[in-house]
Amino acid sequence: ALLNFIMLLGWNPGTEKEFYTLEEFIKDFSIGKIHKTDLVAFDRQKLLWMNSQYIQKLTDEEFAKRSLKFAPAGAKEEFLINIAPLVKSRIKTFSELKDLIGFFFEKPKVDKKMLGENYKEHLQNAIEVIEDIEDWNLEKLGSFLLERIDRKKFHTGNFFMDLRIAITGRKFTPPINDSIVILGKDETLKRIKSVLANL
């Protein structure tokens, strides 16, 4: 990403193309397309965006290998391969990974102020649904939760936000249903029940 970014500083290919390999750059380069620019005030946000695009293009296996040294202590490569599809599009640099997935490895502290006014009802119903799921998978979890939301006339966004906060302690995380399936039924129930018991 850094090489790609630097190649486009002061050089304009005259097209909409933004991503170049070194070989493509050498082939397309023309001294006549160099223009004056302020290289001191380069666009850091553009660089971060470009880096995020390269991260998204990694295979799940490549992502896992590169992220090992940035992940929370105890993270294994197999686990990182499993969560790669959930997080690749949510980070701009690997240094953001530890904060994003830390809840998988450590029970979070939940701030009651983050929860909605109906959080107790939402979480109690989530417990009932999750306890009844025997075949633990993403499809069952999603359909059963949505069925309960519809039956109880809950606001879908508010329900899932309370569930997300109870399990992760955060408002912004990887997809919550996928995260719940990876976290496991027992740990998920333990965290939700803990919030209801202590808040």
Image: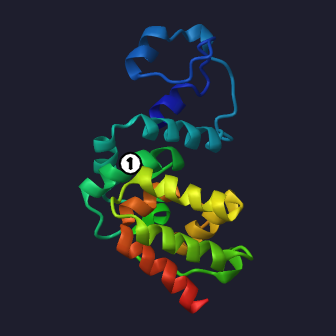
Residue position for label 1: 84
Residue under the point 74% across and 76% down:
117
Q: Describe residue 163's horizontal placement relative to residue 135 as left or right.
A: right
Residue under the point 63% across and 81% down:
111
- Whether residue 129 appears in this view of the structure is yes
Residue under the point 50% across and 74% down:
127
Q: Relative to the observer, which residue lies in front, 10 or 150?
A: 150
Q: Relative to the observer, which residue lies in front, 136 or 99?
A: 136
Describe the element under mark 1 as helix, strand or loop. Answer: helix
Q: Where is residue 173, by image quadrant?
A: bottom right
User: Above or below — where is 111 with respect to 74?
Assistant: below
User: Above or below — where is 18 with respect to 13?
Assistant: below
- Whether residue 108 appears in this view of the structure is no
Residue under the point 57% across and 85% down:
196
Q: Where is residue 105, by image quadrant?
A: bottom left
Residue that protrudes farthest toward the front in the picture:
151
Mark 1 Cα within 10 Å, few/some/many (few <14, many 20+)? many
